């Protein structure tokens, strides 16, 4: 009987830690979306060393974390369907936005704990102006990247988007 209980516990332990928000080693392609998930988002964001990692992709939302190298950037982009929320956990950045990529009328400098709201259809870029990696998390509505997206570098991300 004890053997059966141990087997059952071993089978359910990984599920319990997954739902609770396991943030240890991660296989490429793992994404906790479409199931309940609780996570220390500050810790997850600050420990991330990849350019972009999608951790949760649901039907209407997606959460990714990003680490932008000093003097690096997210890259000029526009989302035609959906809004975007970005929170800076650590670092200094410049945010530029505009209705046209040739006319960026919004230009602000931000740092730790600032939030950026990007309306659908706006061109935007976030540039790291610090001497340490910029650590941010991003909420897309609807999801922007395939579930489980993992780009180790800016260049890898650009190649995946055919830029």
Image (tube, grey):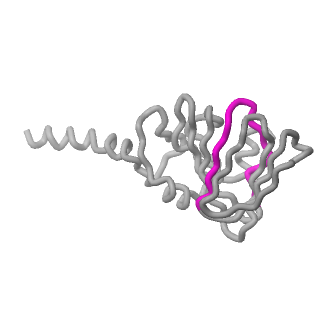
Quarter holding the C terminus? top right
Quarter holding the N terminus? top left
Pick the front one: 59 or 22? 59
Spot occupied by residue 63 in the image (x, y as percentages of width and height): 56, 43
- Which residue is depicted at the point 34% across and 46% down? 17
Location of residue 134 by image quarter: bottom right
In the picture, measured across the screen, residue 106 lies left or right of residue 43, that is right
Is residue 76 positioned above or below 58 on the image? below
In the picture, measured across the screen, residue 160 lies left or right of residue 64, that is right
Spot occupied by residue 108 in the image (x, y as percentages of width and height): 77, 57
Q: What span is in magenta?
A: 72-89
- Which residue is depicted at the point 45% across and 54% down? 40
Location of residue 57 by image quarter: top right
Residue 22 located within the stretch drawn in magenta: no
Residue 86 located within the stretch drawn in magenta: yes
In the picture, measured across the screen, residue 43 lies left or right of residue 128, that is left
């Amino acid at each position: 009987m004890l053997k059966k209980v141990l087997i059952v516990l071993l089978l359910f332990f990984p599920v319990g830690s997954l739902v609770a928000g396991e943030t240890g080693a991660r296989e490429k392609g793992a994404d906790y979306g479409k199931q309940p998930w609780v996570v220390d988002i500050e810790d997850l964001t600050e420990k991330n060393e990849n350019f972009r990692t999608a951790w949760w992709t649901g039907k209407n939302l997606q959460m990714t974390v990003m680490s932008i190298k000093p003097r690096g950037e997210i890259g000029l982009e526009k989302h035609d369907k959906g809004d975007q929320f970005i929170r800076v956990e650590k670092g200094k950045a410049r945010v530029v936005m505009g209705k046209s990529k040739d006319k960026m009328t919004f230009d602000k400098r931000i740092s730790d704990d600032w939030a950026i709201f990007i309306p659908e259809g706006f061109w935007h870029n976030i540039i790291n102006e610090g001497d340490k990696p910029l650590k941010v998390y991003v909420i897309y509505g609807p999801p922007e990247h395939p579930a489980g997206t993992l780009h180790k570098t800016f260049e890898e991300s650009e190649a995946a988007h055919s830029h």
